[in-house]
Amino acid sequence: MAEFADYSRFVVTLLAILTPFAAIPVFLALTEGQGHAFRARTADMAALTVLSVLVVSAFTGDVLLRVLGTSLDAFRVGGGIVLFLMALSMLNAQISPVQQTREEADEAGTKSALGVVPIGMPLLVGPGAISSTIIEMKRGTDWTHGAAVVACIVVVCAGVWLSLRLAEPIGKRLGRIGLNILNRIFGLLLAAIAVQIVSAGLLGLFPALAGLRA
């Protein structure tokens, strides 16, 4: 089982990737004109979607890697690059195309289950969150590690749920500038985490690099 610091880092990583504050303006726009009950149901559905996708990814990621014939280190490098691209968009206070394309945004208004698509997926949970969850799950093999990873996911999803439930007062209090500042802070954290993940993957793929670093 990994140390507490590793799990806390995983929680911060997921929060930075999911960026619930970045989803607040989109959430408010998609639910504009709807009542409080509708927004509450949409927030519940979005958080449940994120929880379901990440938990399933945690327990099926190992099978996926074996089927694809991909090593964990290669997956770390690829996942880290995805996270870094997301971080660059966050530093520009924009939603990354990795999370949601223009076509998906245009079609969002035609969806009835907004909590599932596009808010739950792909706006909140996407390739970055899925790859990070698989990488974290592979850090250990015992059941206590798996339980700890699931607990981290539950904590993050609770934060996402709370942010969406309070989207209206948060949006009014912080304003667009305040939300952008938070997104940039999380973007900087995510960029550092992405570099660390890529570095670990490269050292696993090319052990000789460890000697050069020393």
Image (cartoon, rainbow, N blue to C red):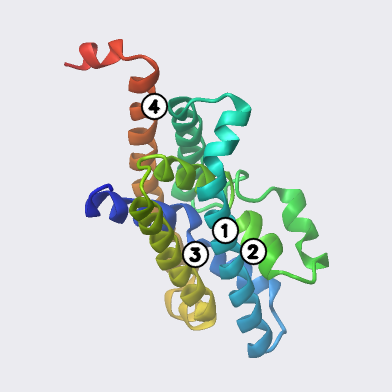
Residue drawn at x 34%, y 55% is 144
Which corner quadrant holds the C terminus? top left
The image position of residue 72, as x and y in percent, is 45, 30
Q: Residues within 10 Å of mark 3 (few under 14, many from 20)?
A: many
Is residue 181 visible in this depiction of the protein?
A: no
Q: Residues within 10 Å of mark 1 (few under 14, many from 20)?
A: many
Q: Residues within 10 Å of mark 4 (few under 14, many from 20)?
A: many
The image position of residue 69, as x and y in percent, is 58, 24
Q: Is residue 26 left or right of residue 54?
A: right
Q: CA distance from mark 4 to mark 2?
A: 31 Å
Pick the residue in front: 89 or 47.
47
Q: Where does label 3 land, which residue?
A: 20
Amino acid on which disc 3 is placed:
Pro
Q: Where does label 4 land, which residue?
A: 201
First-in-chain label (1 vs 3): 3
Residue 16 sits in quarter: bottom left
**Tag 4 and tag 3, C-beta contact below 8 Å:** no
Front: mark 4 or 3: 4
**Tag 2 and tag 3, C-beta contact below 8 Å:** no
First-in-chain label (4 vs 2): 2
Can you tell which mark lies on residue 119? 2
131 relative to 23, above or below: above
